[in-house]
Amino acid sequence: MRTIIEPFRIKMTEPLKITTAEHRQRALEAAHHNVFLLAAEDCCIDLLTDSGTGAMSAQQWAAMMLGDESYAGSRSWKKFEAAVHEITGIEYVFPTHQGRAAEGILAECILSPGDVIPNNSHFDTTRANIEYVGGIALNLPCAEAFETGVPAPFKGNMDVEALRRAIAEHGKEKIPFAMITVTNNTGGGQPVSMANIREVKAVLEEHDIPLIIDACRYAENAYFIRQREAGYENSSLLEIVQEMFSLADGATMSCKKDGLANIGGFLVCRNSEWAGRFRNLLILREGFPTYGGLAGRDLEAIAVGLMEALDYDYQVYRHATVEYMVERLVKLDIPMVQPAGGHAVFLDARKMLPHVPQLEYPGIGVVNALYLEGGVRAVELGSVMFGHFDDEGREQPSPLELVRLAFPRRVYTQSHFDYLIEVIEEVWRNRDAIGGHRIVAGPKLLRHFTCHFEQMG
Ligand SMILES: *Cc1c(COP(=O)(O)O)cnc(C)c1O
């Protein structure tokens, strides 16, 4: 087979700053050992997130020039609404400035204190929005999700039996809706099968509980279904996502992911009564219902991007990049989540640094070493991001200590990825020298963004 190439060429460049080890050491200290507090300029390969960091296509830039900035009922809104309708088939569409705004409106309008929201795995902002209004965010990943080294085709699935038990335990009155996140970002960017979504929907339907899809990576998930699930080999990605959304009563979306845009999101639902509540809060928080938190030009770029994400050749290349990375890192015996996820590679920091206790945050040790070694910015998805405090106020670790290297869409080329492999290999070779960290300042909610660390020992 021939090399799978980037299915685009470059007509605008942006310089990367090449830094020295001393410069990076000083920068990390000034950032209190938290890479979120670094200046982006001081990062060479920035893999902090795939959110809003993608490169737009010529078609998207051209569409932006057609942006209709009318306050109400703009042409751009019509295009946005039509694209969302085509993909989801869901009637009521609310544009928001990003995914968390959609989650916030959903949670504030529908949840009461003490309500329980099951999900395969809540993303951090989803969980924070639910907890902020007094709800309980319940993660019900399938058993395979915790076996990071064991490949399985749909490790993002929800544990359907656990869902049944949760409904029996809490009662449907306490569960105003359930969610399923595609792909399962928290669980390693792993896909959810159509069969699992169908089964989850069937269980929820028995109890009249609506299903909300956290759809951020709907297109990447569709590609996995086409590659891995029997019966979808000949379906287009659009057909697959249409079938998926036909099982949903609503969805939240961050267009900074598979919207291939730098900002934006939406909330959709079928229930007209919910729609009325969403509309009122949208006007208060985001803006008039035909623009939400977005400029007309953003609506244009998203309308184009949502469809471009479903381009098969684009997804082939996108997944080839992730697989290329995983294959090479596995060959070096570096512990990581297998098989490859959709938008990132996930190193298993707990297995990389068995000498660092979980509450000394092995993920932070790996993240900071990657930066010092090669100016690579990654993110911890472990006890700093997902740990919580029990009723006695004792800190509880997260089940997994992962380090995510998320790949911006259409931004980096093969040589950037080869450089990245060299940096990770060097960190792996020097792993015994990496120690623990403690948090010396920071908030309790979403603490990973702003907290300060100190090296221990
Ligand atoms: C990014 C993300 C969100 C939140 O979207 P923002 O646009 O960052 O607010 C929610 N869920 C998942 C799965 C995500 O990846």
Image (spheres, rainbow, N blue to C red):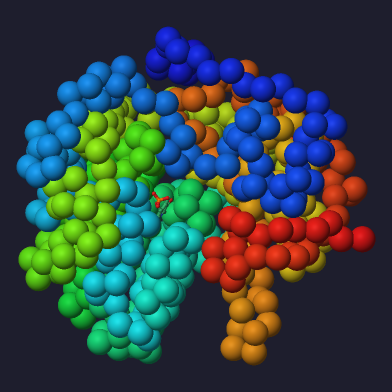
Can you say whether 210 is above or below 14 in the image? below
Q: Quadrant of residue 166?
A: bottom left
Q: Quadrant of the C terminus?
A: bottom right
Q: Quadrant of residue 91?
A: bottom left
Can you say whether 162 is above or below 218 in the image? below
Q: Position of residue 55 (x, y in %)?
A: 42, 26
Taking the image as drawn, is residue 346 in sight? no
Taking the image as drawn, is residue 419 in sight? yes
Numbered label tally: 0
- Closer-to-camera residue (430/392): 392
Can you say whether 113 is above or below 384 in the image? below
Q: Residue at x 43, y 31 (%)?
A: 54
Q: Position of residue 292 (x, y in %)?
A: 22, 50
Q: Position of residue 420 (x, y in %)?
A: 67, 29
Q: Position of residue 131 (x, y in %)?
A: 43, 75
Can you say whether 224 is above or below 325 in the image? below
**Residue 395 in the figure: left or right of residue 288:** right
Q: Residue at x 40, y 15 (%)?
A: 8
- Closer-to-camera residue (370/184): 370
Q: Residue at x 23, y 62 (%)?
A: 284
Q: Residue at x 68, y 82 (%)?
A: 394
